[in-house]
Image (tube, helix red, strand yellow):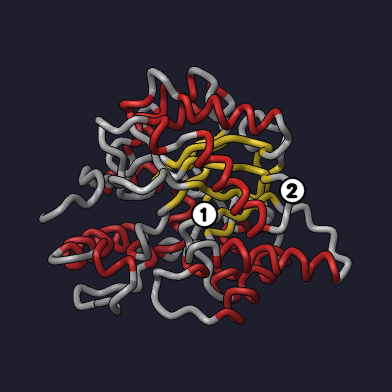
Amino acid sequence: MRYRNFGRHGFSCSEIGFGAWAIGGAWGEQREDDSLAALHRALDLGCNFIDTAAGYGEGRSERLIARVLAERRAAGKSDEVFVATKTPPAAGDWPPSPYDVADERYSEAYLRANLAERLANLGTERLDLLQLHTWTRAWNRNPTPFKVMRQLQQEGLIGLIGVSTPEHDQNSVIDLMRDGWVDSVQVIYNLFEQEPAAELLDTAKECGVGIIVRVAFDEGALTGKFTADTTFPDGDFRQGYFAGDRMARTVARVEAIRADLTGTDYTLAQAALKFVLAHPAVSTVIPGIRNPAQADANCGVSDLPDLSAALLQQLRRHAWRRAFWYGGK
């Protein structure tokens, strides 16, 4: 496993992190013993960064992480594991409407109460990193929630402060970085979604902001395991993400990437992660890991050679300016 600086924050971060959404639910059936084994295996392989959220199984993901860390401490293992979690806005539109008021969606009382839940679920008195789970550009002129977060940081309840980008307007967080409100940003960046390379990633590097990359596999499509006929059961997040003809359109583009990898030693999944890691601003990428085999496959990518400059340039042509999947087409 290779390690990288987490922005300017003095933490040596495994470049392959553990994305813990699927072990909380919303991705089809998930056995608890697989989830626990996946976490243990990833940590054994040198992963030291786990990303979770309040909304991942309504705290289930956080509680599983706490259980694994407690088991490892009891076994005498001295892992230094950095756990990032997220607080969603109070009930309302997702993403927030431009007309929403920050003090209502992320009030101090709400943030403090939600923080207490995160601490309880993770079995700790201090969070390594608390991220706001979404944002709106409308709040940039008066980012009151981050003022509250800085106060919580001063009280010793939070280590670092971050934000997870709104899918439809990721560049809305650039001003937050420049104005010093956030220590980290979690962003969608992959072979299809390459817009962050235009400004967001370079700005993070300049400002010393840690970058956590999510959706590196485009919700599984860039692993190459889907076909145009792939469907998902009720309750699986991907059923909506790939609704209508989206799966067929996506698979066609994935096959074009696969063709570019012919004659290389990379699988689609390996190339997808290596593409993300090629940008120097990236601190860690957090693929979802549901079982020990996936832990082996994803963590093992760190030990592979980097993409050549020629292959990296070739893969850049697969940028797909679809933004986020809006309603309809």
Residue located farthest toward the right when viewing the structure as drawn: 76
Q: Is residue 205 left or right of residue 40?
A: left
- Badge 1 marks a residue whose secondary structure is loop
Q: Position of residue 195 (x, y in %)?
A: 32, 36
What residue is rendered at 35% in x and 68% in y? 224
Amino acid under label 1? Ala
Q: Please say whether residue 91 is visible from this viewpoint.
A: yes
In the image shown, does 90 or 278 lie closer to the viewer?
90
Which numbered marker is on residue 53?
Answer: 1
Badge 1: how crowded within 10 Å, few (<14), some, or many (20+)?
A: many
What residue is rendered at 45% in x and 45% in y? 133
Q: Position of residue 316 (x, y in %)?
A: 33, 43
Which numbered marker is on residue 125?
Answer: 2
Q: Answer with the quarter of the image where residue 200 lies.
A: top left
Residue located farthest toward the left when viewing the structure as drawn: 328
Residue located farthest toward the front when viewing the structure as drawn: 109
Q: Please say whether residue 265 is visible from this viewpoint.
A: no
Q: Is residue 236 left or right of residue 274?
A: left
What residue is rendered at 27% in x and 41% in y? 168
Quadrant of image for the C terminus: bottom left
Badge 2: how crowded within 10 Å, few (<14), some, or many (20+)?
A: few
In the image shown, does 33 or 314 lie closer to the viewer?
33
The mark total stands at 2
Amino acid under label 2? Glu
In this view, 195 is above or below 28: above
Q: Position of residue 231 (x, y in %)?
A: 25, 77
Quadrant of image for the N terminus: bottom right
Q: Is residue 116 left or right of residue 87?
A: right
